[in-house]
Image: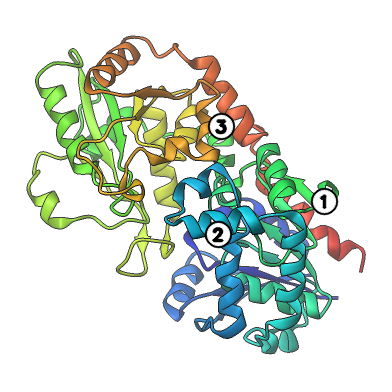
C-alpha cells in the first residue's frame, strides 16, 4: 500500500539538508513510500528533476501565498512573542521591547497559537491533501508562512506532522513557531533546549539527529588532489591557503575593506612567507560586479546556483559545489570571517578559525554593524567553546594568522568542543537517522 509524505523544498537549505544527504534515499528505501515535493517555481522543478528523478518523487509548484487579515496579524505577532538576548538587541523601539517583555511568556504563546489555529483561514494546500491524501508531512522550515499553512492544513486533517529546525540560530534569533508540529527534529541538544524554552515543545516530542549536511565531512575522504585543486583556482599548491568567507552584502559593509586589508597585509609580508588568499563568497549572495572589476588580482570562489536576483533563500548547491566546498575545507590552512556557520565547517576539519571583531567603517546603526552577531545568543555559545579566535584589531588579526600558519594546534580542544556541541554526532549518519525517524509514523498504519 502506497504511503505518501509531503516535503517542502522552498529554500536552498532544505534541498541541501534533505535531498543531497541520505535523508531522501533512506525515505525511498521503503518501496511503498512516495514523496510529494513542494517548491516555488517550474524552473526549480526542472532544475531538481535533472538530479532527482525517481518515479516516486512528485513535484508540485505552490503559488505565493498572500498574507493578509488575521493571518498577517499573527505573522507579525510571532516576532513579539520571542524574547532573547538576540531579539532584545535587534528591537528598534521601546514599544517592541515593552511588548515583548509583556507578551513573550509561555501562557501567552499557548493562547496565541490556539487562536491562530482556530481563527486563521487558508486553503492554499487543501487541494493537495484531497489529491494525495498524505500519511505524514515534513515541514523543513517552520519559521516561514508557507510551511505554517501546510502545517495548519495537516493538523486540521489530523495528518501526522514533523517539523525540521534547519538552522542553529532561528529559535533564538527570529521568532516563535506560530503552530507546533507533532514532532520536531533538531540538530543538537542546544537547539532542543531552546525549543523547549521558547516554543513549549515537550522533550519527548523532540528528536536530536545531528547535522545531515555535515555527514559527508565525516564520511567522504575522497578529496581532489592538492595540485589539481590549487591549479583550478590559479593558486600555488606550495603555499599555505588562507580562506576569507565574506559576511554578505546585507549583513554589513566591511567585506571589500577586509578583502583589501588581507591582500595588503599579505603583499607587505606581514603574514610571513608562503601564504596565498582565496575569497569564498556565499552561495545565497550576489557579487557586486563593479567592485569585482576593481580587483583583477582577486582569487575567488562563487559557488552555487541562484534562482532570483536578490539575496536570500533562492539558491542551491549541487553535488559538485558541495564536493568543492569539502576540498576547500580540506586544503585550506585557516579560515578568516566574521560570525558565520562556516566556522563550524572549519572546526570539523580541525582548521583554525579567526573571526574579525572590528569595523572597517562606523556603522549607522546596530543592524548595519558587521560585528553584531557576536552578541547574539547562538553565536555566544559557539564562542564559549574556545574554538574560535576573535581578532579585535588589525594587529590581533596579523598575530593570529602568523601563529596559526606556523602551528595549527592552538585552540584544537576548543574546536573539538565546538564540533561536539553543534554537531552532536560525528558518525556521518544524521541523514539516515532523520529518514528513519520520519518513516516511523508509517509503521503504525
Spot occupied by residue 115 in the image (x, y as percentages of width and height): 74, 75
Q: Nearer the viewer, residue 26 or 378?
A: 378
Among numbered discs 2 and 1, the one appearing first in the sequence = 2
Spot occupied by residue 122 in the image (x, y as percentages of width and height): 65, 85
Residue 14: numbered disc: 2
Q: Which residue is mark 1?
A: 202
Among numbered discs 3 and 1, the one appearing first in the sequence = 1
Q: CA distance from mark 3 to mark 1?
A: 23 Å
Q: CA distance from mark 3 to mark 2?
A: 24 Å
Residue 381: numbered disc: 3
Q: Quadrant of the C terminus?
A: bottom right
Q: Nearer the viewer, residue 19 or 185?
A: 185
- Say if 151 sits above or below 195 in the image: below
Classify residue 261 by image quadrant: top left
Q: Nearer the viewer, residue 7 or 237?
A: 7
Spot occupied by residue 12 in the image (x, y as percentages of width and height): 47, 60
Q: Residue at x 74, y 59 (%)?
A: 29
Q: Residue at x 58, y 76 (%)?
A: 73
Task: Say which of marks 3 and 2 sits in front.
Answer: 3
Q: Are marks 3 and 2 in contact (CB under 8 Å)?
A: no
Among numbered discs 3 and 2, the one appearing first in the sequence = 2
Q: Classify residue 51 as left or right of residue 148.
A: left
Task: Say which of marks 2 and 1 sits in front.
Answer: 1
Amino acid at each position: 500500500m502506497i504511503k505518501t509524505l509531503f516535503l517542502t523544498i522552498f529554500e536552498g537549505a532544505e534541498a541541501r539538508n534533505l535531498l543531497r544527504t541520505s535523508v531522501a534515499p533512506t525515505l525511498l528505501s521503503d518501496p511503498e513510500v512516495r514523496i510529494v515535493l513542494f517548491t516555488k517555481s517550474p524552473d526549480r522543478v526542472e532544475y531538481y528533476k535533472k538530479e532527482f528523478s525517481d518515479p516516486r518523487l512528485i513535484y508540485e509548484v505552490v503559488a505565493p501565498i498572500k498574507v493578509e487579515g488575521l493571518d498577517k496579524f499573527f505573522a507579525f505577532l510571532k516576532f513579539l512573542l520571542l524574547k532573547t538576548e538576540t531579539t532584545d538587541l535587534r528591537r528598534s523601539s521601546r514599544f517592541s521591547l515593552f511588548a515583548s517583555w509583556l507578551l513573550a511568556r509561555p501562557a501567552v504563546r499557548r493562547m496565541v497559537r490556539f487562536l491562530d489555529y482556530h481563527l486563521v483561514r487558508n486553503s492554499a494546500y487543501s487541494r493537495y491533501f484531497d489529491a494525495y491524501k498524505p500519511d505524514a508531512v515534513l515541514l523543513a522550515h517552520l519559521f516561514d508562512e508557507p510551511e505554517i499553512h501546510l502545517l495548519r492544513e495537516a493538523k486540521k486533517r489530523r495528518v501526522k506532522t514533523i517539523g525540521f529546525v534547519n538552522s542553529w540560530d532561528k529559535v533564538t534569533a527570529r521568532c516563535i513557531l506560530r503552530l507546533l508540529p507533532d514532532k520536531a527534529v533538531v540538530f543538537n541538544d542546544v537547539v532542543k533546549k531552546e525549543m523547549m524554552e521558547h516554543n513549549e515543545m515537550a522533550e519527548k516530542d523532540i528528536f536530536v539527529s545531528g547535522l545531515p549536511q555535515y555527514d559527508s565531512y565525516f564520511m567522504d575522504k575522497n578529496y581532489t588532489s592538492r595540485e589539481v585543486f590549487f591549479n583550478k583556482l590559479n593558486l600555488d599548491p606550495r603555499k599555505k591557503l588562507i580562506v576569507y568567507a565574506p559576511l554578505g552584502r546585507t549583513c554589513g559593509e566591511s567585506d571589500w575593506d577586509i578583502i583589501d586589508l588581507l591582500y595588503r597585509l599579505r603583499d607587505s609580508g606581514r603574514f610571513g612567507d608562503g601564504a596565498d588568499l582565496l575569497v569564498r563568497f556565499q552561495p545565497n549572495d550576489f557579487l557586486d560586479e563593479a567592485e569585482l572589476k576593481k580587483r583583477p588580482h582577486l582569487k575567488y570562489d562563487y559557488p552555487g546556483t541562484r534562482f532570483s536576483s536578490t539575496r536570500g533563500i533562492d539558491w542551491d548547491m549541487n553535488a559538485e559545489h558541495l564536493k568543492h566546498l569539502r576540498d576547500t575545507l580540506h586544503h585550506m590552512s585557516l579560515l578568516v570571517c566574521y560570525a558565520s556557520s562556516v566556522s563550524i565547517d572549519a572546526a570539523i576539519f580541525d582548521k583554525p578559525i579567526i573571526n574579525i571583531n572590528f569595523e572597517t567603517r562606523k556603522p549607522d546603526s546596530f543592524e548595519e554593524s558587521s560585528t553584531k552577531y557576536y552578541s547574539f545568543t547562538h553565536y555566544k555559545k559557539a564562542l564559549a567553546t574556545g574554538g574560535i579566535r576573535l581578532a579585535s584589531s588589525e594587529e590581533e588579526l596579523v598575530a593570529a594568522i602568523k601563529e596559526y600558519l606556523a602551528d595549527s594546534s592552538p585552540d584544537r580542544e576548543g574546536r573539538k568542543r565546538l564540533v561536539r556541541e553543534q554537531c552532536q554526532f560525528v558518525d556521518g549518519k544524521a541523514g539516515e537517522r532523520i529518514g528513519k525517524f520520519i518513516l516511523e509514523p508509517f509503521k503504525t498504519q
